[in-house]
Image: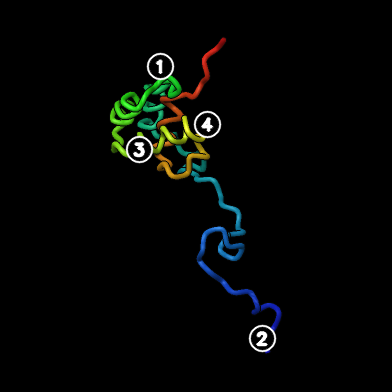
Amino acid sequence: MPSPDSAAVHTDRPGDAHSRSTSARAAPVGDDGAAPEPDTADAADTADAAAEPRTNLLGLDRVGFQSFCAELGQKPFRATQLMRWVHHRGEDDWAAMTDLARAFRERLQARAEITPPTV
């Protein structure tokens, strides 16, 4: 008969309690013991995104969604997915739009907004 300690089965499925790491991860440290400098390419992208006006997705029709997604370098089907989240489901939380790629959601967060018109 197996002991109580060996009763747990390890799987590699995401979300399984046994597949999660319980060890704390240390923050990255440079050669001098200090935290590494932020990547200047990421900082430049963030500065460019902040300088550009954000597009309100509630003001776009199907063609507007398609051209906006094309500007972001996305394939046409992403416009349909995004339009469903915004207009069909009424979602305004980028993290909840789980069928969109994470990198695309991050770009949306920087370049778009979902703001109803003020009355």
Tell me which numbered mark, 1 or 3, is placed earlier along the sequence: 1
**Labelled disc at residue 2:** 2
**What whole-number distance in Å separates the C-alpha atoms at marks 4 and 3?**
17 Å
Above or below residue 14? Residue 39 is above
Residue placed furthest toward the bottom:
1
> Residue beneath label 1, please?
53
**What whole-number distance in Å separates the C-alpha atoms at marks 1 and 3?**
21 Å
> Residue beneath label 3, please?
78
Q: Which residue does the image show at 38% across and 18% down from the upper left? A: 52
Q: Which residue does the image show at 40% across and 34% down from the upper left? A: 39
Q: Amino acid type of disc 2?
A: Pro
- Callout 4–callout 2 Cβ contact below 8 Å: no
Residue 64 location (% of width, % of height): 33, 24
Q: Amino acid type of disc 4?
A: Gly
Callout in the foreground (2, 3): 3
> Residue beneath label 4, please?
90
Above or below residue 20? Residue 108 is above
